[in-house]
Image: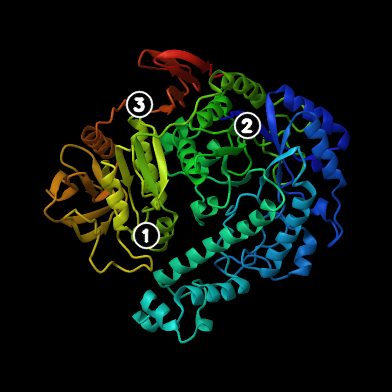
Amino acid sequence: MSKELGVCYYPEHWPEEMWAKDAADMVAAGITWVRIGEFAWSRMEAVPGTVTLDWLDRAIEVLGAAGLKVILGTPTATPPRWMIDKHPDMLAVDENGNPRKFGSRRHYCFSHAGYREESKRITQIVAQRYGANPHVVAWQTDNEYGCHDTVLSYSEPARVAFQMWCRERFGTIEALNEAWGNVFWSMEYFSFEDVDLPNLTVTEPNPSHVLAFRRFSSDQVVQFNKDQVDILRAHTDAPLIHNYMGRILEFDHFAMGEDLDIASWDSYPIGFLSDRLEATDAHKARFLRQGDPDMQAFHHDLYRAVGKGRWWIMEQQPGPVNWAPFNPAPLPGMVALWSLEAFAHGAEVVSYFRWRQAPMGQEMMHAGLQTADGREAPGMAEARQVAEIVKTFADAETAQAPVAIVFDYASDWAWHTQPQGAGFDYFRLVFATYRALRRAGLSVDIVNSDCRDFTGYKAVFAPGLATLEPSLVEAIDAAGAVGVLGPRTGAITTEFRIPDGGRPGVPGLDVRVELIESLPPHAGMPVAGGGVVDHWCERLSGSAKTLLSLENGAPVLMAEGKRWYLSGFPDEALFDRIVGIVAEAAALKVQPMSEGLRRRMLGDLEFLINYDGQAITHDGQQVAACGVVVRKDGQLVAESDGG
């Protein structure tokens, strides 16, 4: 499997006479891939129906002649201004009824039939033009679906499309009323035309209605993407990719991934630390210039699953970004660390955003590998260093990890719809589980909730899985793995009702949820032996064996054989205890990590990744501050010096 570097480039932003030198400089820096075109619709079609692609022909030729492999994006994330005049109702509408106007990007509603046809039309044009071009070696569809809260649209086209979706799903209005429990509060409908969108209600809307709308909205994104995929497949054999984002959960990435060849994501570690992560002030201060030690790795493992084993970084932060509340510069060595960490998790390509800092527009303050006036920015030297280091393990392949976490987008929609307590969030729960396993030095795979083959895993965690299919539990059991379910697993049906058999309904495990409480901060319940249940606590009964209990004797962790159930949201100390108990039962070898140090196996190669601003020694090996060490059988293979 290849391990290569790429960069995002915008030839339309620069005089044509600069292109050849830029291409040569990219190659000299060890870059082999270049992404272009994803925001260029206004230059492709400045006037409706008048397509101008000669400039793009020349750009692709210049880049390709220099030896670069081009990733060409479909430009549908940035419809030009004339599109609004042609389709004035194409704009997405937010939950408060406000249109998302022109003047930025992603200003379209996925349900608008006219815009979907326009998107297919421009995709057809570029696919026909470049599908057989030898320099176009991969394609990206659109750009960052879901960015800027643009999946959920409350427009009139969305209302009409949702009614059609409901008709197809339920068949009759009586079936919809029964599924959603609309007898409650006299919410019954008498025709599908009565069904509105679940916003602007007096108090919270029916959770079944909301969850259905979330499923519909996800389906709209998946179909929008598939429209482009079907067109591209007819014209090219090159792999098709989309660039997902960090902690964007509004659509089912696994469903979309079925239509694509490779998953990629856009990694901005420092931006995400302040913008998308709940953590203490002390934690954020310690990792202010590095990013959280687990946030990037979690998404690497998630998108490796979405890509069915194939995944890239399409945009890697090379310096300060422009969009977070605060935007500090990375410590020396961090650009190299982030890149090498991605390769440790199986990335084929790490592509930096961007080649040269933009001198105009909303991203003027976003760093590139070059400054706006063409000088090398600090990240350039680290990119060169990475290009040399990856040569030492170019043939290494990802192997199955010993532990898996089940991930399910619909569970996030469900618990976002009815959290039952501030602070209870599906991502936080799954991420806390992932963190605990990483603190134990374990490599982790993330798997889709549709997975039914867990062969080779010693332990499988399924926290917060809203709807529990018995076949999932049986598949974990058949693999001989310890299956840790809960909290809040198996709590609802797919239509958001309490299951007829009660909660959690784990086959072969006599555990019942008798009562649920959510807890405010600092009101956690102490666990006998150490640790605290926080945020969420379920009162359990049943004949299963109690492995851990609250100080008042209430069960926290219960088990029958290898089927286990966890009743609450553990703090870090309790999670570490739970991982230790699971490791002992599953014959897993743990290696406790220092706060900033993480470990990842790539085949038989061991990566020690130090997010800390100081050197750390682990197992006799010193790892430089913000550095990476690669070992095989305890012997040094390669290292980055942390700058």
Front residue of this view, candidates 131 and 514: 131
- Residue that badge 1 annotates: 419
Q: Position of residue 601 (x, y in %)?
A: 42, 27
Q: Give SS at disc 3.
A: loop
> Sequence-wise, which precedes: disc 1 or disc 3?
1
Name the foreground residue: 573 vs 239: 239
In the image: residue 114, left or right of residue 534: right
Q: Is residue 615 visible?
A: no
Cα separation between marks 2 and 1: 36 Å
Amino acid at the residue labelled 3: Met
Please state, as top left, top right, bottom left or bottom right, where the N terminus lies in the image. top right
Which residue appears at 68% of the width and 64% of the height?
A: 116
Q: Is residue 286 left or right of residue 39?
A: left
Say which label, 2 or 1, has the lower sequence index: 2
Give whichever of 432, 166 is nearer the camera: 166
Tell me if residue 466 can be seen.
yes
Residue 130 image label: none
Identify the residue position indicated by label 3 in the image: 593
Q: Secondary structure at mark 2?
A: loop
**Residue pictured at 72% horizontal, 52% vertical:** 75
**In the rendered view of the protein, which quadrant contains the C terminus?**
top right
Q: Amino acid at mark 2?
A: Pro
Circle 3 Cα neighbour tier, 10 Å, few/some/many (<14 / 14–19 / ≥20): some
What residue does disc 2 label?
318
Q: Are discs 3 and 2 less than 8 Å apart at CB?
A: no
- The three-letter amino acid code for the residue at tag 1 is Pro
Tag 1 secondary structure: loop
